[in-house]
Amino acid sequence: MAGQDDADRATDLGVSALNRGQLSAAIDWFRRALTLDPDAPRAHALLAVALLRLKRLGAALIEAQTARGLAPESPLAHLVLGRILLAHRRPSEAREHFETARGLDPSEPAPLRGLAAVERYQDRDDRAAELLTQALELDPDDIETLVALGDAHLARGRVDEAERWARAALEAEPEHADALVLMGHVLLRRGDVSGAREHAVWAIRADVSDPDALRLLAAIKARESLLLGVWFRVSSVLAGLGPSAMLVLLAAYVAQRVLRLALEDLDRPAGAQLIGYAWLGICVYSWVAPGIFQRMLRRELDTVRLRDDF
């Protein structure tokens, strides 16, 4: 019984860390709980959530499937598995698990957030906002719903609405990393680079490994460098499709070279060769840009760590 109590206590501490965006600490607590009780479905599911937020998708899927196997009637297990399947780009399967979770616990807003995430994945942000509004009616103080609703509005360019929900989330939990990141993106969209950086710093202070905070910092650096900014935006768009920016550009270069060879006997504009070399230069730049960008981010993080208020 004492071991079970200790496992539950460790899980609760992990939840507190997870809610504050302290992902590394949360993972440590959940693993400690599973050391004490290896068959605890809640700890497996919550560990999967933390791993998912760190983009460790393979490990997250294993933990989520374990949780579902241990507790097939658990709404949490289906909810977490749905989120991870969506991250694996399997929206139809994800929707099934979110619907199952909603049927098992209709009063919980999280399944509606999951369904909204599926809608956003399929580029239906307005429908996602409707589902999130329904989720907020179930629990008006749910921070994750507030942040998700703000993010959905920001995706549609409704900056005022996004700021409204970001501020509501920060009023409820001033150190919530996701809310800080959302407000940072709102400020960056308004052109307030300094304010966006401060919110990125606060989010990183909560957990230096938080990927969303690091992406905000990357977006800030992209705003400050024109060439790196172009590469960052193109890469961000292509990341959702799968291939890297460099591979897409290189494939396009090879395709145009093949086309030129096939049409070798036809008249070509005088600048065709120059365009080809320019395209190759873009490919090379796309190859080296990630390294440059990472070095800039490391320097920025070193600056953050040296701040007196960090």
Image (cartoon, rainbow, N blue to C red):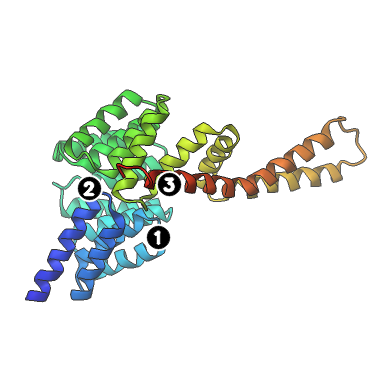
Mark closer to the observer (3, 1): 3
Numbered circle sitting on residue 79: none
**What amino acid does circle 1 point to?**
Arg
Q: Nearer the viewer, residue 307 or 294?
A: 307
Q: Earlier in the sequence, mark 3 or mark 1?
A: 1
Q: Residue at x 15, y 52 (%)?
A: 105
Q: Is residue 71 visible?
A: no
Quarter containing the C terminus: top left
Q: Residue at x 39, y 49 (%)?
A: 211
Quarter of image, res 270: top right
Classify 10 Å Cα crowding around label 3: few (below 14), some (14-19), many (20 and above).
some
Q: To which residue does mark 1 refer?
A: 56
Numbered circle sitting on residue 301: 3
Disc 1 element: loop
Disc 3 element: helix
**What amino acid does circle 3 point to?**
Leu
**What amino acid does circle 2 point to?**
Ala
Quarter containing the N terminus: bottom left
| 177 relative position to 295: left or right | left
Quarter of image, res 122: top left
x then y, percent, for residue 166: 27, 33
Q: To which residue does mark 2 refer?
A: 110
Q: Earlier in the sequence, mark 2 or mark 3?
A: 2
> As displayed, is residue 15 above or below residue 206?
below
x then y, percent, for residue 154: 36, 31
